[in-house]
Image: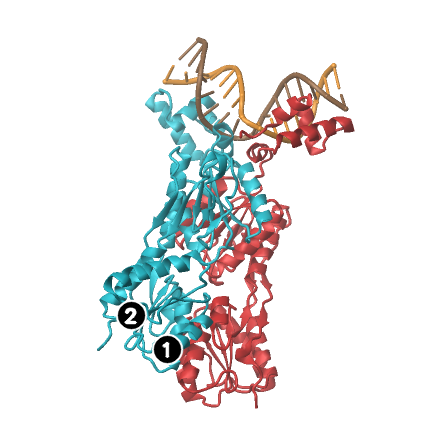
Chain colours: A red, B cyan, C brown, D orange
DNA sequence: GTGAAAGCGCTAACAG
DNA sequence: CTGTTAGCGCTTTCAC
């Protein structure tokens, strides 16, 4: 099944190639009847223009490269999905590249993508900390999603814009929800302090507790790891240090799972004695828990979509600047129902 | 930074375009010194041939389309990673397409990929049951990974080959391991019976129990759902029906988690009283569990890699036929250590 | 209104 | 050994 070319269409319609092209693209002035004849021929032959030829001529490929350092992990996947969705709607195809966090692979992919004349690049990651920019003077727009370039981009100014989740807002939403449901001894167990996301979420939480004069249970944020194990360990610690705790906001759903297990083992009921709110809204984790976990959803697909929109705008000549944040949303489930008291 | 063209290189080296091409591609007979001069010019100018032009001419794009129905879920991601890895090594780039299980989207993507003249297609899924073939007479080879086409492919014979995990082997490995570690009352809790994967895993387990005259604890496979909730429920059921059970092989890690929680709640110790083996070796699940879960790893990346290899072979004119199975491996962790007795 | 011709960047066949 | 030519499929002047 060879592809029909415009030549075939022209022959079939009894016109020249140039005329056929004009007819198909609505260019120039042609007799409507000619246009129709060409359209008809194209339809009959199942003609579709060869994008390679078009690209060669136009210098635009309608492709973009998506580079992830995250092995398509839990975070970058939804981001990529959202981006792919938004780009696909604009008839843009996506080359996917997984660098496995290897700078050398990243470089190879970058060369390949530029070589293939992509119209733009989306770089995704698993951590929001600034990373070395992917390259300067590439000649194509770059948008970062779930990660951001460090520095201000060198001599040429910023090398691209970035779209990030609203970690501060997420922490605040969790805190507000716990306050609203009557909790007054709220603790925070989260990942390593060196993670910007952990610090921002903590800041968001503090931001809503402080105005109400509600201190953090245990007096401080319990930084540790992003693991269930740490959740279990920290919960034990917390029960000893601050037995009055009636709510725990966790920096991840995995931590929340560990916390839940430890509370149950210690004979505390969730949510009656202690409410739990997680972060990520990672379905298998939050729905598998007993009771199901309330959690902050970063709306990763929206981040991807936003990044794609910014990229399309940049390709169109209207580059976004700086960092943009996408709001998340709190999903309330049984683990943080109102205290029964 | 405009891309240097072969014309620039030719000019810089003081030769004609044709000569430059030959020099760069090692064709024809040229004076070594000329070759060197051209190579030098290319290097200096950072020349890289325009793949669009090459593709236009050669009718090969060195791109393949990867279509997933799974929204890049837990199963298709590692598969895609493996495939992308193997293809990337062959300098082939991957267009990624997520159909969200929507036949119409699938069709759109298919048209787009064929239109872009991909050299081949990889179709991945989340279930191994036969699915409607993606299309017949596409003119490009297709390999299915983690899914397979139904029918025998219509008038033209099979429309492509398929690469699947070894579910039977996985079930057998789990059973053998439990027998070897001294368990004799082995139960099986798994997902819905309508899932081929569930039936195959059960078959594998039975295949190793039967020869040793070891009956299945509770007398039958407990089919249910792929969820923690079902794991909890089924474990309760099992303890009532077959209190002597000393090992449970679970059809998924999520089920295994639920089982573990229920056993703990019932006062049974893992692994001392009852061993647990899961399936999928899904790291966040198996490592987060307490104790960490033994689990069967389907080696999804290998499946992807195998699919990519088959596709490359097919593109090269040596299409694979039928269904190929990739061996998994059992990862033993604390949840199935030998009975202490 | 329509056709002929040039050219996007490259390779392959043929002259010289 | 090297240069010239044709052409992949398409769009876009520019004549007619």
Q: Where residue B217 appears, x then y in whole percent?
A: 33, 71
Q: Where residue A242 appears, x then y in whole percent?
A: 45, 88
**Would residue B272 appear left or right of A185 to someone viewing this image?**
left
Task: State the image quarter where residue B282 is shown.
Answer: bottom left
The quadrant of the picture occupied by the C terminus of chain B is bottom left
The disc, 1 or 2, on the residue closer to the chain's N-terminal end is 1
Q: Is residue A308 visible?
A: yes
The residue tagged with tag 1: helix, strand or loop? helix
Task: State the image quarter where residue A164 is shown.
Answer: bottom right
**Would residue A33 appear left or right of A126 to someone viewing this image?**
right
Crowdedness near tag 2: few (<14), some (14–19) or many (≥20) residues, C-alpha within 10 Å: many
Q: Is residue B330 visible?
A: no
Looking at the image, is B115 positioned above or below residue A240?
above
**Where does label 1 land, which residue?**
B239
- Mark 1 or 2: in front is 1
Q: Where residue B4 appears, x then y in whole percent?
A: 49, 33
Callout 2: residue from which chain?
Answer: B
Looking at the image, is A108 positioned above or below residue B227?
above
The residue tagged with tag 2: helix, strand or loop? helix
User: Total label count?
Assistant: 2
Looking at the image, is A240 positioned above or below residue A306?
below
Identified at 41% across, 40% down, the residue is B311
Q: Where residue B52 appears, x then y in whole percent?
A: 51, 34
- Contact between marks 1 and 2 (CB within 8 A): the answer is no
Crowdedness near tag 1: few (<14), some (14–19) or many (≥20) residues, C-alpha within 10 Å: some
Callout 1: residue from which chain?
Answer: B
The span from disc 1 to disc 2 (Cα, nearest Å) is 18 Å
What numbered label is drawn on residue B336?
Answer: 2
Q: Is A316 in front, or is A184?
A: A184
What numbered label is drawn on residue A197?
Answer: none
Identified at 23% across, 76% down, the residue is B340
Looking at the image, is B286 positioned above or below residue B85?
below
């Amino acid at each position: 099944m060879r592809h029909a070319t415009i030549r075939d269409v022209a022959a079939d319609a009894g016109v020249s190639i140039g005329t056929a092209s004009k007819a198909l693209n609505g260019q120039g002035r042609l007799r409507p009847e000619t246009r129709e004849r060409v359209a008809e021929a194209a339809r009959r032959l199942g003609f579709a223009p060869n994008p390679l030829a078009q690209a060669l001529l136009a210098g635009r490929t309608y492709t973009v490269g998506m580079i992830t350092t995250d092995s398509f992990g839990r975070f970058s996947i939804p981001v990529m999905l959202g981006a792919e969705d938004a780009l696909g709607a604009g008839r843009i195809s996506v080359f996917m590249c997984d660098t496995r966090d290897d700078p050398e692979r990243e470089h190879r992919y970058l060369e390949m993508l530029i070589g293939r004349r992509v119209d733009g690049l989306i770089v995704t990651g698993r951590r929001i900390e600034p990373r070395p920019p992917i390259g300067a003077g590439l000649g194509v727009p770059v948008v970062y999603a779930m990660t951001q370039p460090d520095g201000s981009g060198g001599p040429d100014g910023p090398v691209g814009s970035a779209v990030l989740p609203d970690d501060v807002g997420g922490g605040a939403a969790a805190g507000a929800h716990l306050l609203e449901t009557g909790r007054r001894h709220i603790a925070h167990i989260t990942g390593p302090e060196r993670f910007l996301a952990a610090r921002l979420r903590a800041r968001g939480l503090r931001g809503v507790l402080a105005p109400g004069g509600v201190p953090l249970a245990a007096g401080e944020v319990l930084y540790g790891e992003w693991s269930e194990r740490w959740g279990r360990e920290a919960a034990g610690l917390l029960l000893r240090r601050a037995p009055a705790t009636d709510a725990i906001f966790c920096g991840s759903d995995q931590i929340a799972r560990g916390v839940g297990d430890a509370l149950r083992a210690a004979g505390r009921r969730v949510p009656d004695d202690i409410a739990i709110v997680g972060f990520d809204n990672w379905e298998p984790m939050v729905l598998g828990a007993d009771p199901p976990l309330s959690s902050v959803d970063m709306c990763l697909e929206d981040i991807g979509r936003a990044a794609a929109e910014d990229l399309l705008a940049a390709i169109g000549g209207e580059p976004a600047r700086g960092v943009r944040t996408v709001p998340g949303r709190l999903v309330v489930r049984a683990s943080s129902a109102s205290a029964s008291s």
